[in-house]
Amino acid sequence: MSRSKTTVCWVSSARYRQPLAAVDARKWGLLAEEMRDYEFRVIGFSASLRPRRFHEGARFYLLPQAPTSPLRYLTMFTLAPILLVWLALRYRGRIIVAQSPFEGAIGAAVKGFLGIFGLRPRLIVENHNNFEEDLFMQRRVPLEGLYRRLMLAAARYAFRHADALRVISTSTSERARHYAPSLPQARFMTFSDTDVFRRTARTIPVEEAVDIVYAGVLIPRKGVHHLLKAFAQLDVPSAQLHLVGKAENGDYAAALRQQAAELGISERVRFCGAVSQAELARYFAGARVMVLPSLSEGLGRVVVEAMLLGTPVIGSRVGGIPDLIRPGETGLLVEAGEEGDLLAALKQIYRADVNAMGAAARAFALEYFSPEKYATGYRQLFELALDHSDNESAVAENSQA
């Protein structure tokens, strides 16, 4: 008789479509294949106002996506707890994964409520970024002071009731340790369909390439306005700057276009919009350097993706980016927001031995991440959570004896 599967209930504000986007399909298919002793049930948002339920690697229970952020938060914090309780009771969920400290508050509340029914699920809280500040760095938030206090109260509550943490970088580990110094942590990168980047061949040798690529959403926190100012002063007339990513903040994207016009570089700056992983790989394949000028960053997955194409990276010395870039070997680090520093790094890239730098970058990226390491990371994380709770129970029993 085969051992029954362990049910993992996931709660996240991520948006999913049906069928899943290619990267999501690869991620959940991988976890289902590599972790057959687990069953995944995922709460998230639909890509529309229509709620959805379907099975594709995991079983998805998608809430309707409201048109504004406040309504989405209201939906998440009212409907997700009810759905999570039902899933945990119906399928005897042993593990709850919250993909941020804020969803972690939902998981913590549900964990406590389920104790009434004799269930003791383990709660895993994930920390992918500077959750205390990032939201306020990417858009204006009404009643910011009140909003900040509520967010931090929710995060503290989540960390207080968690059994294990998942972090993605040195900086996210340190922030989580600040709130939960004794909890076990597992550290591994967010998922990337690296097969796409591994398989793609360069369209031009890196030492012959002149173009620069930025990859990421267009929001103030990414510091693209600093990149535009530095690029405008770069004396490489044939170079083009490709801004690849969704205009998530429409006002900021419009301001960037206006800035490019005022700097006289509109003809050399391409706003490429959101692209597939395969298209992103092709941009990296023709670039001399990828630049990530963020003011705050959890890790910077695109750094690894660019490196897999043998493309050196210039990144800000913030968050997890220094975990990935070895200055002078795989790329260059600059101070966040310092346009002179960024300009100097761009100039250096056109003088450096980028062929050697790109080869070292690819070797590092191949070692740093693989889909198999991602699945192994989650298996170890689940074991940490289960062992931590069991150990706490044993300590409590011994203290009462």
Image (cartoon, rainbow, N blue to C red):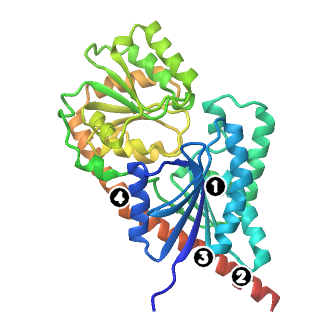
Local secondary structure at mark 4: loop
Q: Position of residue 39 (x, y in %)?
A: 51, 71
- Amino acid carrying label 1: it is Ala
- Amino acid carrying label 3: it is Leu
Task: Report if the CB atoms under discs 1 and 2 are less than 8 Å apart.
Answer: no
Q: From mark 4 to mark 1, how far is it between C-alphas?
A: 24 Å
Which numbered circle lies on residue 215?
none
| Marks 4, 1: nearer the viewer | 4
Q: From mark 4 to mark 3, how far is it between C-alphas?
A: 25 Å
Of callouts 4 and 1, the N-terminal one? 1
- Amino acid carrying label 4: it is Ser
Q: Position of residue 157 (x, y in %)?
A: 76, 57
- Name the residue carrying label 1: 176
Local secondary structure at mark 2: helix
**Residue visible at 66% across and 35% down in the picture:** 68
Q: Is residue 31 above or below residue 94?
A: above
**Residue visible at 57% across and 21% down in the picture:** 251
Number of labels in the image equals: 4
Q: From mark 1 to mark 2, how far is it between C-alphas?
A: 23 Å
- Amino acid carrying label 2: it is Ser
Of callouts 4 and 3, the N-terminal one? 4
Q: Is residue 133 above or below residue 378?
A: above
Q: From mark 4 to mark 2, how far is it between C-alphas?
A: 35 Å
Instruction: For the C terminus, give its image quadrant.
Output: bottom right
**Image quadrant assignment for residue 277:** top left
- Name the residue carrying label 3: 386
Given residues 134 and 68, the one toward you in this image is 68
Q: Residue furthest front?
A: 50
- Name the residue carrying label 4: 370
- Name the residue carrying label 2: 393
Task: Report if the CB atoms under discs 4 and 1 are less than 8 Å apart.
Answer: no
Q: From mark 2 to mark 3, how far is it between C-alphas?
A: 11 Å
